[in-house]
Image: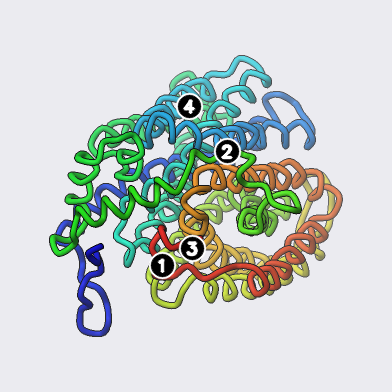
Amino acid sequence: MTSTAQSPRPGGKPPLPEHFGHVIFITASAAMGGFLFGYDSSVINGAVQAIRDRYDIGSGELAQVIAAALIGSAIGAATAGRIADRIGRIRCMQISAVVFTISAVGSALPFALWDLAMWRVIGGFAIGMASVIGPAYIAEVSPPAYRGRLTSFQQAAIVLGIAVSQLVNYGILNIADGDQRGDIGGLEAWQWMLGVMVVPAILYGVLSFLIPESPRYLISVGRSGAAKDVLAEVEDKSVDLDARVEEIELNLRKEHKPTFKDLLGRVGFLPVVWIGIGLSALQQLVGINVIFYYSASLWQSVGIDPTSSFFYSFTSSIVNIIGTVIAMLFVDRIGRRPLLLIGSVGMTLSLGLASWAFSYKSGSGTNISIPNAQGTVALAAAHSFVLFFALSWGVVVWVLLGEMFPGRLRAAALGVAASAQWIANWAVTASFPTLSDWDLSGAYVIYSAFALLSIFFVLKWVPETKGKALEEMG
């Protein structure tokens, strides 16, 4: 078989494919699902207090409404791989865009609390699909030498979606004079926050018609000629396309459609599947989504005024973007494991500092405060935590999940790992309001313990996949 390797550039780097700009467009279009994932996940941050007030509910009921999307996300993630193998990656994206749109309209116009929760679950299903299809599709259309950087577009889009949602929330809140329930055109401010997602959802649907189907999917359904055309769009002219198609066909012939049974080993799942589950769960158990789902109410709970709390939510999102850019620059240079370890150490220290600062919280009801020094430490620690998460676990876990599984298991294993991520996300999200009422500092001690555990998990079990072709994953 003719080699498909490219001659290196000076300094040992492979040349950029001639169509690399087009590859970036394809990647960015697919990553719009990640943007919606981030937007829909975090936009609820601006509506937390308004929902509590409008429906007169306690922390337990509030947590279930906020976390309702995660139930749908787990279902969407578990089924997306099978759907994608049956109807293709692009059709999955289009279904997800339609569901995102419907969910945005329904969430903005609820007539009861259960109704709002139902639309959140439906939107979560679309999030779950996007969480699986995005990294899988991007990995399948990316040149191997740049796959890590391109796959990290998914996380970049997620954090951009988070930042835009917080900026939109902040703008709407200011239009409503700082009142989440303020009237704007006959709707309350928080309803506009949830409804604006219609715009990016429609854009995602439009873009999905402008990008090609995955070559691996096309070959799997007997459309090798179409697959070769797609590979010609994304690979350099020096690559032998016939050999590349033959390589993928050979790999597919060794495979069969993955099922849940294929993931099982002697002790439950196969070791590589357990690693994927562990990565997914730890990514959430460090408490990152407490920042993105509850940060506005979190800062208000320690005495910061509502407008400032929304501003700090936005600055956290900007830090998230900065960290993600750092990860994108280094994920293919220094590898996956080193970034994970750097992030784990930084998160452990940051969460420990936050826990110490929150232990100085005093007062009750609306008369809550924290000393200025500890308040400054808490803000700095929260932003530091977001930075270390973003430059490591935020990006690298998605990269690893897109490339670490053997081809014969990839779609099914991705679904299981992503489902574990959403279940862990749900556990953190649903428990935080109650935990914070009990002991906010104690909640952060728990998150810091999981961050510490992640160090040992990476050292013991996580493989390095830097520079390997997908067909090499055994």
Residue sitting at x 68%, y 31%:
65
Residue sitting at x 41%, y 27%:
95
**Which disc, if any, is residue 319?**
3
Q: Is residue 231 visible?
A: yes
- The image shows residue 219, relative to residue 138, as above or below, that is above
Determine the image quadrant of residue 97.
top left
- The image position of residue 404, as x and y in percent, is 51, 59
Mark before the other along the chain sequence, 4 or 1: 4
Residue linked to disc 2:
259
Residue sitting at x 75%, y 68%:
357
Residue linked to disc 4:
104
Instruction: Rate crowding at label 4 as few (under 14), some (14 to 19) or many (20 or more) other CA atoms within 10 Å.
Output: many
Mark before the other along the chain sequence, 2 or 4: 4
Task: Identify residue type, mark 4.
Answer: Ala
Confirm or deny contact between disc 4 and disc 1 (CB under 8 A).
no
Task: Identify residue type, mark 3.
Answer: Val
Mark before the other along the chain sequence, 1 or 2: 2
**Mark 1: secondary structure:** loop
